Amino acid sequence: MNSIHLNGIGMTSQRTRERLAQRLRDEGITNETVLNIISSTPRHLFVDEAISHRAYEDTALPIGMGQTISQPFIVARMSELLLESGPVNRVLEIGTGSGYQTAVLSQFFNEVFTIERIGPLQRQAQKRLRQLKLFNIHYSHGDGFLGWPDKQPFDAIIVTAAPEQVPAALVEQLAEDGRMVIPVGPQGGAQTLRFIQKTEEQLVEQTLEAVKFVPLVNGIIQ
């Protein structure tokens, strides 16, 4: 696990981050570790400077290339779900995007493996996360549908874009007793957040709340 060193990156936003954490607490996030990490993670560094004044609103924001940085409530909710079912050492993230969710994960888990299909986003996120001195993150420019078979099994998988069905490759890469948090459903249609637990005998799947994510897409962009 790592922690972010805030020296020189905008300590004046600390009060704003704490207000965001309190808003998430009021909306039902109960894990104080998650809330503390949200309040210490400088979300304004993960969006374009032109919209950085909106960084601590509880809303998704554009990051270019048709992608978004997830709503803070969703980041907190998905992180909380991963933590609820026991310890996790190795987590796979599908969809690095801006790197914000990655930064949050890296402060919980010993190793984060993150895949991004869009080259410019992947390179920008990697540079940003290294500047924040988060060094327990492994990066891949690849197709999220395929996962990262060379690094399996994973204690947890988190998917930050919505496929229409749960990719079989990701299920296969879960360790026994591993868990996955994934939005599922068509773009522009009804999507739901799913929690999947893998046991020796079966997959146990729970459908949670309605969500809205960009679609999970095959292939890569250089």
Image (cartoon, rainbow, N blue to C red):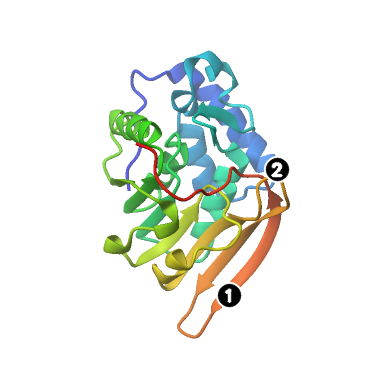
Callout 2 secondary element: loop
Q: Toward which corner of the image does residue 2 lie, by quadrant?
A: top left
Secondary structure beneath disc 1?
Answer: strand
| Residue in the foreground of this view, choosing between 85 and 210 | 210
Within the image, what quadrant is residue 61 found in?
A: top right
How far across and how far down the image is residue 174, in percent? 41, 68
- Quadrant of the image containing the C terminus: top left
Q: What amino acid is at disc 2?
A: Glu
Please name the residue shown 39% across and 65% down the image: 155
Considering only order in the chain, which callout, 1 or 2, is on the residue closer to the N terminus? 2
Whether residue 48 is situated above or below residue 186 in the rendered picture: above
Q: Quadrant of residue 149?
A: bottom left
Residue that appears at 64% across and 39% down: 24
Hey, what amino acid is under mark 1?
Val
Name above or below for residue 104 compared with residue 59.
below
Q: How many marks?
A: 2
Residue drawn at x 61%, y 61% as measured from the top left: 194
Q: Is residue 159 left or right of residue 6?
A: right
Residue 86 visible in image = no
Q: Position of residue 53 (x, y in %)?
A: 57, 16
Please say if 88 is above or below 142. Answer: below
Q: Position of residue 154 (x, y in %)?
A: 37, 64
In whole angstroms, how far apart are the C-alphas of marks 2 and 1? 27 Å
- Provide residue 25's location: percent of width, then percent of height: 65, 42
Question: Which residue bears the numbered disc 1?
Answer: 204
Q: What residue sits right under mark 2 in the picture?
A: 27
